[in-house]
Image: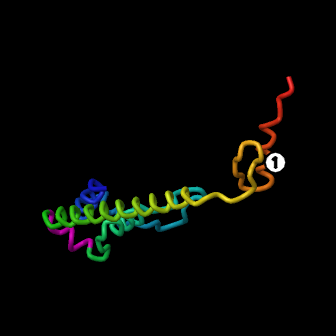
């Protein structure tokens, strides 16, 4: 993500006639995307990255004008992203462990004691206790 942010800043600082900058700000003049084609434009991807790193997209031009300032903004944004990612990972882990620790309810197998999710699941499980016919 750091490389993507730095590259975005590099492209925005380019002269307006350069191809990468023209592609960054371009739109289709005629027609539409093909069915089953690209779902997301590159500019949509850029906005998503900026949002993840808490960088305001409307200030992108002014932020990227100074290379050193843009580098600092990128570093701060990536630090914020890492902190948010770690917090979200801890929250996901807590939710998963809470789900795993809740006792399962449902019909119980009288042979093995296994708890099944439904009566149908119990019937399928009971087949495993039948002796196999050779």
Specify the quadrant that holds the N terminus.
Answer: bottom left
Residue at disc 1, secondary structure: helix
The residue carrying pointer 1 sits among few (fewer than 14), some (14 to 19) or many (20 or more) residues within 10 Å by Cα, namely few
Outermost residue, bottom direction? 58
Label tally:
1
Magenta region includes residue 17: no
Residue 124 shows up from this direction: yes
Location of mark 1 (residue): 123
Tell me: 35 left or right of 112.
left
| Residue at 18 percent of width and 62 percent of height | 71
Question: 97 and 52: which one is in front?
Answer: 97
Residue 17 shows up from this direction: no
Q: Quadrant of residue 13?
A: bottom left
| Residue at 76 percent of width and 50 percent of height | 121
| Residue at 57 percent of width and 58 percent of height | 34
Question: 129 and 89: which one is in front?
Answer: 129
Specify the quadrant that holds the C terminus.
Answer: top right
* Residue 102 placement (x, y as % from top left): 57, 60
| Residue at 55 percent of width and 56 percent of height | 100
Tell me: 116 left or right of 28.
right
Q: Quadrant of residue 46?
A: bottom left
* Residue 54 placement (x, y as % from top left): 30, 70
Outermost residue, right direction? 133
What's drawn in magenta, residue-wise?
A: 60-67
């Amino acid at each position: 993500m750091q490389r993507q942010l730095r590259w975005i800043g590099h492209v925005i600082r380019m002269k307006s006639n350069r191809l990468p900058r023209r592609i960054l700000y371009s739109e289709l003049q005629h027609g539409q995307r093909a069915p089953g084609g690209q779902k997301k434009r590159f500019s949509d991807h850029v906005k998503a990255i900026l949002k993840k790193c808490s960088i305001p997209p409307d200030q992108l031009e002014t932020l990227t004008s100074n290379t050193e300032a843009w580098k600092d903004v990128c570093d701060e944004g990536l630090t914020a992203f890492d902190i948010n990612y770690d917090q979200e990972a801890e929250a996901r882990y807590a939710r998963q462990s809470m789900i795993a620790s809740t006792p399962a309810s449902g019909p119980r197998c009288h042979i093995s004691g296994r708890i099944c999710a439904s009566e149908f699941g119990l019937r399928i499980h009971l087949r495993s206790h039948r002796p196999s016919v050779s």
